[in-house]
């Protein structure tokens, strides 16, 4: 869904520790093959909007579909509290209705105007979880698009003090606050257990597809966990499942626990810059002690599973 970094803007994401950073002001799309997000750099998951990821206000509900993806093995849109619109061109991803989902589009602004786009997840009535690389550098405000209606402006935002664009151990998470209720049911954080290699995850975002189109639709797909580290979760795209792309940065990786889908990871980057169709997607591990502390110190009322 996303190939370039979070918070995609016009600049290119900088690779760090062997990873092509997808952090930046960009949107992230579930495509099949993601990239690591670096601040304001165009890399896989987070940077889709760097340099343009669609309209900052009212995204359309359809985009060109270059192919017919396979149907995900779980109802990914249902998990996001939405309904399926139709299959998209990104591998094994489905376009979902944004009408009631907590996965929202983030339009990023610097002093000159729109700077890019990312994805975020509502974790409290007035708080959205996203990637740090979407918020750093010159971003001065964020407007949250819920899929319909007016955008909701941010009142403030913070990113982890342990976020470093070129460090593979960087903690790529941030939180955005609003002055009004967002009207979406928050998703809980998965803090009770580690992710497991081989288990199925759901990934979602507002990023581009493999053709570079998109940025105005919410998509979701499935991927299997391929590696679990202290700071990062990984999924590997090998022709099946889904992957993130530019503009998906900051979106959720969901795992199920006790029948409830919860946030285990935050889309951060991909291993192959400029390609959503192959390689590894990386997600900040919410269960990391410092990441969990950062989020809960800011949003003590966030749900946990």
Image (tube, grey):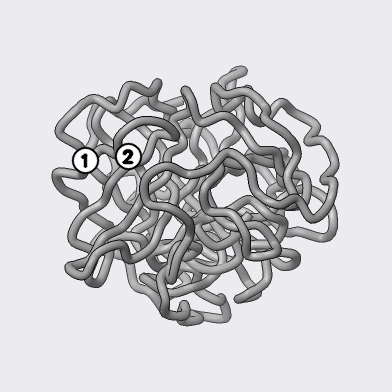
Above or below, 303 against 54 in this view is above
Q: Residues within 10 Å of mark 1 (few under 14, many from 20)?
A: many
Q: Quadrant of the N terminus?
A: bottom right
Q: Foreground: 263 or 90?
A: 90
Q: Position of residue 237 (x, y in %)?
A: 76, 59
**Mark 1–mark 2 distance (CA, rounded to whole Å):** 7 Å
Q: Which mark is residue 177?
A: 1
Q: Position of residue 282 (x, y in %)?
A: 57, 60
Side of 206 relative to 138 (left or right) = right
Element assignment for label 2: strand
Question: Is residue 230 something one can see in this rendering?
Answer: no
Residue 125 in sight here: yes
**Location of residue 137 (image quadrant):** bottom left
Q: Which residue is mark 2?
A: 128
Q: Is residue 235 left or right of residue 299?
A: right
Residue at 21 percent across and 42 percent down: it is 153
Q: Secondary structure at mark 1?
A: strand
Q: Using the image as rendered, state which of residue 165 and residue 126 is in the foreground.
A: 126
Instruction: Establish if 126 lies above or below 54.
Output: above
Residue at (17, 68) in percent of width and height: 111
Identified at 48% across, 33% down, the residue is 190
Q: Are marks 1 and 2 in contact (CB under 8 Å)?
A: yes
Q: Tell me which residue sits at (45%, 62%) in the image.
A: 49
């Amino acid at each position: 869904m996303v190939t370039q970094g979070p918070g995609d803007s016009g600049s290119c994401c900088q690779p760090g520790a062997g990873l092509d950073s997808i952090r930046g002001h960009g949107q992230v799309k579930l495509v099949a093959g993601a990239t690591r997000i670096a601040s304001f750099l165009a890399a896989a998951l987070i940077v889709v909007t760097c340099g343009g990821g669609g309209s900052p206000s009212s995204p359309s509900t359809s985009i060109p579909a270059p192919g017919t993806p396979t149907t995900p093995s779980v109802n990914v849109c249902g998990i996001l509290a939405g309904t399926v619109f139709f299959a998209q061109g990104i591998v094994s991803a489905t376009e979902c209705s944004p009408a009631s989902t907590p996965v929202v589009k983030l339009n990023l602004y610097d002093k000159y105007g729109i700077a890019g786009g990312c994805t975020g997840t509502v974790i409290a009535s007035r708080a959205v979880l996203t990637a740090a690389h979407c918020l750093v550098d010159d971003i001065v405000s964020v407007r949250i698009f819920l899929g319909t209606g007016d955008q909701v402006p941010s009142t403030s935002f913070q990113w982890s003090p342990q976020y470093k664009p070129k460090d593979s151990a960087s903690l790529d998470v941030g939180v955005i606050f609003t002055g009004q209720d967002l009207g979406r049911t928050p998703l809980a954080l998965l803090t009770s257990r580690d992710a497991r290699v081989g288990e199925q995850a759901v990934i979602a975002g507002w990023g581009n597809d493999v053709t570079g189109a998109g940025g105005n639709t919410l998509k979701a797909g499935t991927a299997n966990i391929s590696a679990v580290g202290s700071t990062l979760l990984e999924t590997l795209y090998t022709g099946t499942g889904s992957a993130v792309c530019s503009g998906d940065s900051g979106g959720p990786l969901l795992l199920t626990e006790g029948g409830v889908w919860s946030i285990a990871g935050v889309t951060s980057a991909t291993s192959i810059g400029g390609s959503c169709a192959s390689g590894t997607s990386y997600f900040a591990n919410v269960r990391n002690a410092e990441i969990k502390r950062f989020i809960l110190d800011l949003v003590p009322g966030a749900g946990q599973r």
